[in-house]
Amino acid sequence: MKPITPSPETLIDIGRRAGLAAVGVCRAEPFTDTEETLSERKSDGLHGGMQFTYRNPERSTDPARVLPGAAALVVGALDFWRGDPERPDDGTPYGRVAAYAREDHYAALRSALGQVAEALRESGHRAVVVADANSLVDRAAAHRAGIGWWGKSSNILVPGAGSLVVLGAVVTDAPLCDTDPGPMADGCGSCRQCLDGCPTGAIFAPGVVDARRCLAWLVQEAGVFRPEFRVALGDRIYGCDDCADVCPPNRVRVRLDSPRAKRPNEAWVSLVDLLDASDEDLMARFGRWYIPRRQPRYLRRNALVALGNVGDPSAPRVRYAVNRALAHPDPLVRAHAVWCARRLGLDLAPLQGRDDPLVQDELSRQVRVRQPLATAASPPPR
């Protein structure tokens, strides 16, 4: 007797019981409008070199490239909000990590989608889980499946979870639906807080992001950190939550508690400890992040920019970390140590390898010394 194909309702129930905040089903037709949009923005340079779904829009917008004969998508959203821990108050400069990067949320998402895929395989169908990959435009799939609306931040907003979700899908040859659910009604209205709240103006039009100005991308970009955005980076070392923080739907969360086991919430990272760590230790701790070419030098680069923005130049550990970076064998690290030292008003005497072009570029750059950090002992302004 031939196994019965699970109904969309059954698959949605499986996904919800597995911990997903929202699940929807839609057809696996190509996302032709999205392909055109991605191609246009790539042509305009708005991708800023980002490869995710931009690498090959023709491929990432066609589910049949993932699974020949694809008929349907089961799309899931997993909410990752775990609260926003306060920065440790121990006198050490800390770098901030965006909420979506504090745990490997995609592992939990793949596990939940895997249970949906297994139900389809048991009924004799092929099913492939796709999450956090270049092979499928997950936001377009989520919108087609009706689990959220396109926000002006360009993110999908899910009722009860807002944009604080990671997205993925099961691509299957099971004929689960003949039509797509209607699109979810827009919940943004006249609100433009994400546009106004972006620290670099990267969201320059509703739903349109210039990756060349987006801090979440710039910390992942290879090469020298763009000088014009170093001060705007503030204390961030990975990701940026600003557009999410000001988004009203993100302030009303229905599912605050997760059935998954709690794990350490790494919202803050000691900058001096990061700069003191070995390559092996850095990759063991942060290897799940998108690090250009898997090279720890970029973690140090980001940490030095952040340290220049929040470090106390009178603190011995800060001075030691900067001096050590000025003598680092990697010219990229030394170059950013130059910027950090000058931003903090520190001496460049420990600098080695001054003749390297990257270091020379930094030495020729104008850098404004940061104002001293306010302390409890500081007199009030007159």
Image (cartoon, helix red, strand yellow):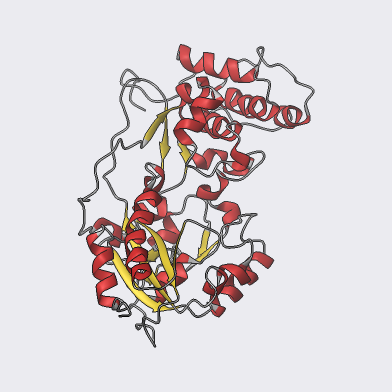
Image side of residue 252 versus residue 280, left or right:
left
| Residue 167 place in picture, x, y as percent | 40, 61
Query: Residue 176: x and y, percent?
Result: 36, 81
Tell me where residue 336 sits by quadrant. top right
Identify whether 219 is placed above or below 248.
above
State whether residue 216 appears in this view: yes
Query: Is 132 displayed left or right of 80 in the figure?
Result: right
Which residue is found at the position 79% from the left and 23% from the top?
355
Name the quarter where the C terminus is drawn. top left
**Residue 227 in the image: x percent, y percent?**
63, 40
Is 356 above or below relative to 186?
A: above
Of 305 and 199, the residue lying toward us: 305
User: Compared with residue 216, is residue 194 higher up or lower down, i.e. above or below?
Assistant: below
Q: Image point 61% across, 35% down: which residue?
A: 295
Q: Nearer the viewer, residue 86 or 373?
A: 86
Most foreground residue, 180 or 318:
180
Residue 92 in the image: state x and y as whole percent.
Answer: 39, 21
Depth order, front residue of 27/53: 27
Quick one: which residue is furthest to the front in this view?
1
Residue drawn at x 35%, y 83% as measured from the top left: 182
Q: Is residue 314 visible?
A: no
- Marks counted in the figure total 0
Which quarter of the rendering shows the N terminus?
A: bottom left
Q: Residue at x 40, y 49 (%)?
A: 241
